[in-house]
Amino acid sequence: MSAEELIAEINEIEICYSLAGPVDGDPLLLIMGLGAQLIGWPIEFVECLTAEGFRVIRFDNRDSGLSTKTGGDPPEAMNLLAKALSKEQVESTYSLSDMADDAVSLLDFLGFQSAHIVGASMGGMIAQTLAIDHPEYALSLTSIGSATGAPELFTPTEVALEAIVGDTPETREEIIQTNIIGSRSLAGPLWDEEYAAIQAERNYDRSFCPEGVGFQIGAIAMSGDRTEKLNNLCLPTLVIHGRVDPLLPLHCGIATAEAIPESKLLVYDDMGHDLPPIYWSEISEEIRNLASNA
């Protein structure tokens, strides 16, 4: 299955997006994580969702993939994280609210008044923010491997942190190998080296923009703790988390579920900061069940 990639001009930037599934299906917006592209959502997982009757929308966040890149030098990621963890005020180019606005504007551009919102990692943070800032657009919320933004909960392993903010090599081969190693560092025991290698090559060849990570980390650091606002959400919510997640440990998922009233927490014992293929069908069914209650 292949899906055509198109460009939407919104919010004075360009957003690359792709549609799949029945035209009259329930709209479902997938939001990817830090530095990740829309192809980070495996097409086989998308097929599981379309089989559940969803019209699936994937897109590249600003500063990733084929969407608009911010000009100038990015902020220094570790400095931003240090400030955020010490609860200092962080000023950056844009916030998670701006990224949520991009997602809402894309829905408007496509003619959808609302959608089921699914986000992974930073995408989960954007999804949560969308539900907070634009509740009328969110029919349901699924937050995968994400967090509330409470700084005291961010306790990654050193290896996992290095995987997202480490130095970038110079050659294509070195970059791809580094990304494969980083993928292994973030995943659980179900990690697939062959798939990781294929994805690393696809990601590099489609778009290579390491500077975008700094700007996106700036958005996370600038946006702070959402816990209190999550307490006020009123929509069907599913929180999915891996028990062995080394970047955003399980307590991040538990805190998210505890913050959102009547949310369901689904924990996979052998999942890290990844989305193993053996769970794609089950997760799709869970999202469909959630949507049916919306």
Image (cartoon, rainbow, N blue to C red):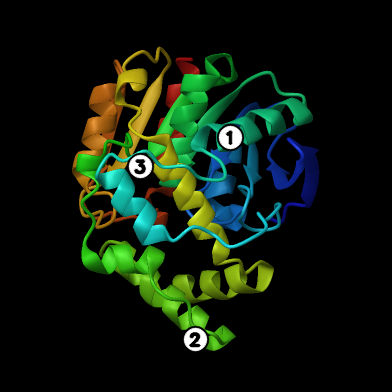
Which element is circle 1 on? Answer: helix
Tell me the residue that label 2 is attached to.
174
Quadrant of res 112: top right
At x 30% / y 16%, what residue is drawn? 261
Which element is circle 3 on? Answer: loop
Q: Residue 90 location, x and y as percent?
A: 41, 42
Q: Does label 3 or label 1 sit earlier along the sequence?
A: 1
User: How many numbered callouts?
Assistant: 3
Amino acid under label 3? Ser
At x 54% / y 85%, what residue is drawn? 170
Quadrant of res 156: bottom left
Tell me the residue that label 3 is attached to.
146
Quadrant of res 120: top left
| Mark 1 nearby-residue class (10 Å; few <14, some 14–19, many ≥20) | some
Between 148 and 249, the one nearer to me in the picture: 148
| Numbered circle sitting on residue 248 | none
Between 10 and 219, the one nearer to me in the picture: 219
